[in-house]
Structure formats: structure tokens, C-alpha cells
Amino acid sequence: MIIVESPTKARTFNRILKGQDYYVFATLGHIRDLPHEKLAIDYDHEFKPEYEIMESKKKVVVQLKKLIKQNKDIILATDLDREGESISYHVAYILGLASENWPEIKLKNSKNHTVQRIVFHEITANAITEALAHPEELRLNLVKAQQARRILDRIVGYELSPLLWAKLGKNWLSAGRVQTVALRVVVEREKEILAFKQEKYFQIMGVFKNGEELLAKLVKKDEVEYQQKVKVKLFIGEYEYIKTSIDDKNLQSIIDDLQNDKYKIEDVQEETIPRFPPPPYTTSLLQQEAFNRFGFPGKMVMRIAQSLYERGLITYHRTDSFNLSSAYVFRAKDYITETYGKEYALEKPRGFRSRSKNAQEAHEAIRPTKVENSPDIIAKGKKLNANQRKIYTLIFNRALATQMKEAQIKQIKIFIRSNKGYLFESDFQQILFDGFLKVLNPTYVEKHRTSPQLKKDALLNLLKLDSEEKLTSPPPRYTEASLIKVLEEWGIGRPSTYASIISLIQDKSYVEREGRYLKPTGLGTIISDYLSEAFPKIFDLQFTANMEEGLDEIANGKKEMVGLLKEFYDPFKENLQEKKMDKKKIEIEDEVKENCPECGKPLTMKFSRFGKFYACTGYPKCKYTKSLLKIAEGKICPKDNGRVVIRYSRKGKRFFGCENYPKCDYVEFSYLKLKSKEIKPDAKN
């Protein structure tokens, strides 16, 4: 019996192993976990967790126990990360094939059964056959690392959340070890934006002609730069912005001077440089690219990638490695030669060095399982929806491009000097050989096939001058993509957790989407400020990164699990007891510049488990409230053409319905891409 997690994965296994003596069973994910109704961590016995069979999986367990009587050989074939290893361990434990003498866990010897673990990076015939021919033992260090993370997160969530309830008077709030750090990053950036003082400046552009028109930027006068670079220290890193010294006082005099001047090309500098392809996708890079290209949230990208992996189309999608298998890179060379020509193929495979110090180098980057399965072929033969095709195309093209020749680009700089000492500059790029860009960016190649044919000392006529008024820009808010990048650079979280972290802080109304950007709510700011001040060590970025490194050391067998838990809990417990003594309440309200339509008193913004809403400050005499709903982008109600908005059930489950409820009862529960644009329905509540 082969045990996997999902029915889709089971179907792929059955297709590969058709006719062979295997029975494939899907657990439907985790089957054993910590109970929701209590902490379930025994501090007096080295943080022993009290696991139980999940209510929704009791029927699965009954089936498993029946099947084990009919199958002597048990093969655990769950995903190769810590979560997958943990699922396999809990299955073995439930079947009586593993034991716990906390904190030690191990497999049991059995006269009636053999237990084996197979590990693979892709669900293909070759990979599965190879894995079955070389089974391994369960990797218990990975199970310990997963359990340590689960215990840490349970301690923070269940010990800190009641403190938040007491401080803020809302029993639906939650704190998380990594979630709060991610929230803090967003909140601190918003403070930096608000503190930034914008300055007005001008940029002068000139349009010149000598046979062909040339747009150039004013950069100097008598070797004195107009452009100024300013660096600002931020909570994370530095922010550099550019302004010029051209302002209201000197703008007109410069323009008058330029209009009564003569110009010629002082110099033309040309340099041919190679441009190399980016590395293959890791989990975070795929999430960033899918967001930047299509606006897909990380959670959506992971769900799509999971479906592609389970259907055998891509390699395992939770990875931080840049490695590509030798089998793939040599097949890619042949494919590139046949499809694009020999000049596009490399003589030797190209490799990439991971920037992550904790990267799992034994893993592979995300790539197609078969280089011959181009997006066009997959679109014809496999039943993929539009979003699956988009993600598969990204993965296919990126992996293939890594094994293509670098592009050759001519960088051209044209310097235009006036008689009075003004200097204009114009930059161009010309593609001499497109290389990997033929696959990754053909549109860019087409736009840069030619460049201006201008020579040194050529005289130019000034056709016009444009002065553009600008304001210095504050550091940008984080998008999902840029927040994932920061978390990865700091070593906070793991590839499998980024999407859920960002989704959670939005679902809790700590952060909201404003266009493509993440903006903290008043509630999120208050929680971040309180927790980071009350627990400065626990929610410090470096401390969180160090804990993540400690979990990696447990997975590698270099650190004891209980030692890491004590290292975290001892100072946390002392800090927590101190803060519980402080009985001061914190009010959560946002100012609203509107008055109550019923009594005329000012409205205020409040928060509930279902999101933000307006409430009258005259409560309890006036009970007026109004919900603020988010529109589901590009979705129209099929019943009455109203806009589809996000709503919540009484249990807090998110769903989507028509804005015209109760007149229209349209409802759906599928995930939709959301805008943060708010609408104000006429109906109360």
C-alpha cells in the first residue's frame, strides 16, 4: 500500500503504476494534530504535545486500519518537505508502526509489516520507479523540526492571543510568531511613508534633431550635477531616491538660457555587454513573479503549483534551491538546439548559486518534468484552466531560459553639450543577439532591434524643451511580492509558509490591499506597536530569523528540539507574566470624516472578526452601523449583474456574494482575486 496526501496525487500514481501490484491511498492531508480547544502542550514534560485524530479524518483512519490488515508492505510517499514527513510519521503512528517516548520518536519493528519511505522530486514514471527501487527510512529529524515549529506557533498563538483579548476587548484577535513579524514589517513601512517629507523639483528634457529626433535629459552645467541622490535609513535597509536641484527659483532662467544656445554631440559611448538569464524558480521567486505579472496572491499560486505537481507536470514546488537535475539540463540542450538553433544552446550546463544560507541544496528548483512538454503541447493535451496554463508557462520558460545562451546587448550613451556648458544625456539599448530573451521577453527584443545612428561632433537642433514638475516619492508600500522577498532575505518563515502568513494578516483585517499594495489597518498598527514594544525580543526580525535557523539545525540533526523550545519559552514566559499584570485597555478606533445619517453624531471605524464597519459614536442610544465590503475584481453577479463582494459567515468563513443581498441571494465559495476598493452598501450591517 502506497500512502499519499491527495486524491489527485493518488490518481497520478495509479496511472504510472497501472497493472502493478500496488494500492494507493490518499489521507487528504494531515490526520493528527493538536486540538483547537486547549493549549495541548505539557510544559512539565519537555513541551510534550497532546496530538489527537482530527474529527474530519476519523473515517480516513478507520479505512487505513482496515487496509493495513490486507497489505503487508507500507510505503509512505507523502511530499518531501517537513509537513509531508510529518504526515507520514503520524500515519505510521496511528497504524501502530511508530512509537513516542517524548521527546524521542521512532519507527517500530513489526513482524507483520514493513514500513518504507520513498522520496521523489517529481511524479513521473522514471522518478517513481527509481524511488521504489531505492526506498529510505522515515526522516525523523524533519518530523522533529515540524513538531518544534508547531509547538512554538501554538505557544505564541494560545498564550499571547488571550493577552490581546484582554488589552483590546476582542476575543477573535490572534498573535503569531512569524505572522506578527510580517505585520510589523508592513506597519513600520507605513510609518516611514507618513514621516517622509515630499519635496518639489523639476526635470528638464530636450528634444533634438539631426535627421532623427532624440530625447535627452539635462544632467549637468559646467560639470555640476543637477541630479542628487538621497539615502534614508529604514526599519529594513535603506531607501534611495533621486531629485534635482532645479526648483521654482532657477527653472525659468535655465530654460531661457537653454533656448538661446547651440548644441552638438560631445561623445557617443558604446559598450557590448552580456545579459545572463535569471535563475530557475524557487517557491518565493515563483510567487513574486506570478504576483508581478498576473496579480496572483501567493496562496493562489501555491494551490495552482500543487495541482501541476500532483498531475506530474512540474517538480516539487516548495523549494529554495536553484539546482536543476543533470537529466533535465542535457535534455534542455537538445530541445533548444532543435527548436531555436544551435547558436542558442550552451556548450556546458549553467548552474546558479543560492543566496539563501539555509537553502535545501539536495532539492531541485521548480521546473517542468519533461522539457518536451511545451506550453502549447500541454494546452492541447492536458485539461488545464487559464490560470494553470499561465503558471506552467512561467515555469517552463524560466527553466528553459537558464540553459540558453546569454543575450548580447549594446549599451549606447549619447552626450549632448551646449555652448554654454549644459550637458544632456540619452541612453539606448540595442539587442545584438537575443539569446534567452527569445523565450523570456520577445517583446523587449522587438522594441530594441535598432538604435539611433548619431556620430560624435554632429550638430543638433533643439526642437523643444519640456519641464516636468515632480515630487520626491516616499519608500513604496510592500506588495505581496516584495514582502515575500524581505521575509526570504531575512530568513523568516519557509517557502511553504509565505503565502499563508500574508493571507492570514489580511483575513484578520490587520492588513488590507490598496490596489497592488499592502496597507496596515488601524487595528493592525495598534497590535504591531503593542506586541513589538511589549515583547521586543520575540518579535525582533533577527531573533525570528535565528529561530528559523534553529529549526533548520533540528532538521539537519545538529540541534536538540527541547533545547530550542526552552531557548524560546523561558524569556517569553517571564515577559508574558509581566505584561499580564498591566490591566490598561487599548481602544481600537479609526477617525471617520462622516456623520451618522440617523442622529448626526460623528461616525467611527470599528473592527470585528468580519472586517471593518462604521458605527455611531452615540451608541448605545444610536445603534447605526454600516459594513465596508471589498469588491471581487472582474466578477459580476450572474443573477442581477451586481458587483460580487467578500462576506463572512457567522463562524468567520469567507465567501462571496452579490452586493444587492438580500434582494439577490447569489453565493459562491471559490477563491477570487480581491481589490481593496471599498463600497458602502445602503443596507445597514
Image: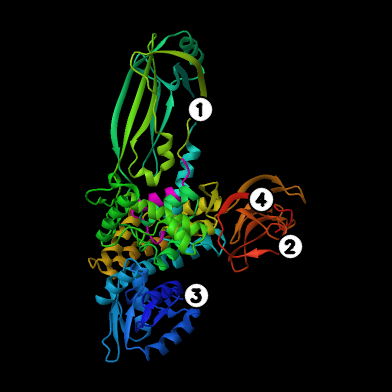
**Residue furthest right in the image:** 598
- Up/down of 581 relative to 6, above or below: above
- Are the residues flagged by discs 3 and 2 in contact, CB closer than 8 Å? no
| Between 412 and 166, the one nearer to me in the picture | 412
Pick the quarter of the image with the N terminus: bottom left
Q: Residues within 10 Å of mark 3 (few under 14, many from 20)?
A: few
Pick the quarter of the image with the C terminus: bottom right
Upstream in the sequence, badge 1 or badge 4?
A: 1
Q: On the image, numbered disc 2 is attached to which residue?
A: 662
**SS assignment at label 3:** loop
Q: On the image, numbered disc 3 is attached to which residue?
A: 37
| Between 213 and 61, the one nearer to me in the picture | 213
Q: Amino acid at mark 4?
A: Ile
**SS assignment at label 1:** strand
On the image, which quarter does residue 452 sit in?
A: top left
Q: On the image, numbered disc 1 is attached to which residue?
A: 470
Compute the Cα span from label 1 to label 4: 32 Å
The magenta stretch is 476-497
- Are the residues flagged by discs 1 and 3 in contact, CB closer than 8 Å? no
Q: Amino acid at mark 1?
A: Lys
- Which residue corresponds to the image point at 46% horizontal and 58% vertical from the top-left? 301
Q: Amino acid at mark 3?
A: Glu
Q: Position of residue 475 (x, y in %)?
A: 45, 39
